Image: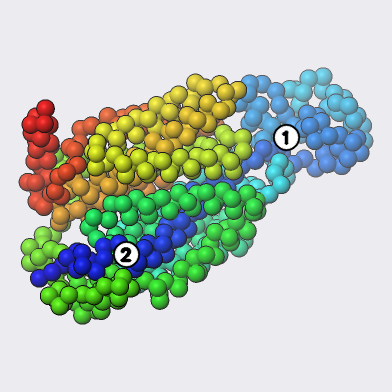
Amino acid sequence: MPTVDDILEHIGEFHLFQKQTFFLLALLSCAFTPIYVGIVFLGFTPDHHCRSPGVAELSQRCGWSPAEELNYTVPGLGSADEVSFLSQCMRYEVDWNQSTLDCVDPLSSLAVNRSHLPLSPCEHGWVYDTPGSSIVTEFNLVCVHSWMLDLFQSVVNVGFFIGAVGIGYLADRFGRKFCLLVTILINAISGVLMAISPNYAWMLVFRFLQGLVSKAGWLIGYILITEFVGLGYRRTVGICYQIAFTVGLLILAGVAYALPNWRWLQFAVTLPNFCFLLYFWCIPESPRWLISQNKNAKAMKIIKHIAKKNGKSVPGSLQSLTADEDAGMKLNPSFLDLVRTPQIRKHTLILMYNWFTSSVLYQGLIMHMGLAGDNIYLDFFYSALVEFPAAFIIILTIDRIGRRYPWAVSNMVAGAACLASVFIPDDLQWLKITVACLGRMGITMAYEMVCLVNAELYPTYIRNLAVLVCSSMCDIGGIITPFLVYRLTDIWLEFPLVVFAVFGLVAGGLVLLLPETKGKALPETIEDAENMQSLGRLVQTVCH
């Protein structure tokens, strides 16, 4: 009996219907960007210092410039790191309302040396040097409360982790389309509620809800488009779906520049999700899923709709459908299958580490750029542009050179770029930006390669489980990355880059231990997967 792939060969593997559906789902991929990396703008931390009662009035009376006000009233003695902490998190215990203070160096009348004046933590809030607002400036997530910014980003990754597992199961149980629409609705509502949150706690709750459904919705969109196209187009369509995410990065930079207030920015990136509810009428259920649920009549109805849209017809000999696999031959997957045999165990551990590393470096480099960059909007925009050549390099190389070497090199390039950035002086800003973009391109390639290769190393019956388990390390990496970046930069601004360099270089070396999958059929059994390494060596021996 014919499969869906057999029918698609006759009615169009990537014709008008698939192109329209891809465009609609690509918009969904684009809209996921602000949730994944929006922390750069939502959580922007500007220069700041303690608010001291009476300083503003004294500054106005004396006619000080902003620079003079900071120089006269803000602590700033000691090493560079100490100066940063004192100026941002401590204040002089001085009554600035007393009339005896002079307009020229007012503290000289209180102490010969400023270092002898007592200091205290900020008790009256902070003054921020920014025309806009972020969650940092509104909820004062600085100094002793700076960890709350880390938590803001970590909690969305906790949502990613739980949602990808839970909703992934529901999508297999209740259908792709139903779960897609539910995730879109919850994402839209929780995003709006986050924008009007009265305090940090409620904002955190709605941020978690967005994480719970947004990545799951993105994954369902990925599954849907790959299930609608023919076998020969799945890889390219999958990569292009991720390119749509990159387009979202460019749009996010422009919207964030136009809307420097975080609440309006949150509204702007959330409201389009309500438009995606129109997909109820635009995108049908996956025929492959319907067949897996023995709903062949509904599947055939949708296939005929696809054929009509593509200007084709379904041949009479292909009117009966069957699943892509014999249901009677299906085995029950187990987590133990991922570590029971030596080669698969090695594959699992290496892939888990690479998912973890890709997430840490990708999110970490974006967050670090937000802390170290001069112009956050331009830096974000330029670094996003390099993701386009990364995708095209993958498309050009994976079927010519293979998977393993481009993947290993991309990890090593990312790691080496991070290490090189540490030693580039600040006055060579153009070189620093160039190397940073090179690192971003490398980790983008590595991220997309791990998505591709993960599915190619496992037998059919545990393939979905393997991708789910290994990719979960991506979310674990996302949970710890904010703490890694923001806490290590408190010690030394370039410290996170050193850690990223180690992660990337090790990941590149480990990739070389995996078998090459270019030109190989997907393994069907445990034995096939175990023999991939030896088969690869045999092919290399024959070729040489």
The quadrant of the picture occupied by the C terminus is top left
Which residue shows up at 34% across the image and 30% down it? 412
The image shows residue 426 at horizontal and vertical percentages of: 58, 24
> Up-down: is 402 above or below 217?
above
Q: Name the amino acid, label 2.
A: His
- Per the image, the residue denoted by label 1 is 91
**Dot in front, 2 or 1:** 2
Q: Which mark is residue 15?
A: 2
Which residue shows up at 88% across the image and 40% down it? 60
Q: Is residue 513 or residue 349 the one in the foreground? A: 513
Q: Secondary structure at mark 1?
A: strand
The image shows residue 177 at horizontal and vertical percentages of: 34, 70
Q: Do residues under tags 2 and 1 come within 8 Å of each other at their CB atoms? A: no
**Mark 2 surroundings within 10 Å by alpha-carbon count, few (fewer than 14), some (14 through 19), many (20 or more):** some
Q: Name the amino acid, label 1.
A: Arg
**Mark 1 surroundings within 10 Å by alpha-carbon count, few (fewer than 14), some (14 through 19), many (20 or more):** many
Residue 23 lies in what quarter of the image? bottom left
First-in-chain label (2 vs 1): 2
Is 370 positioned to the left or the right of 440 in the image? right
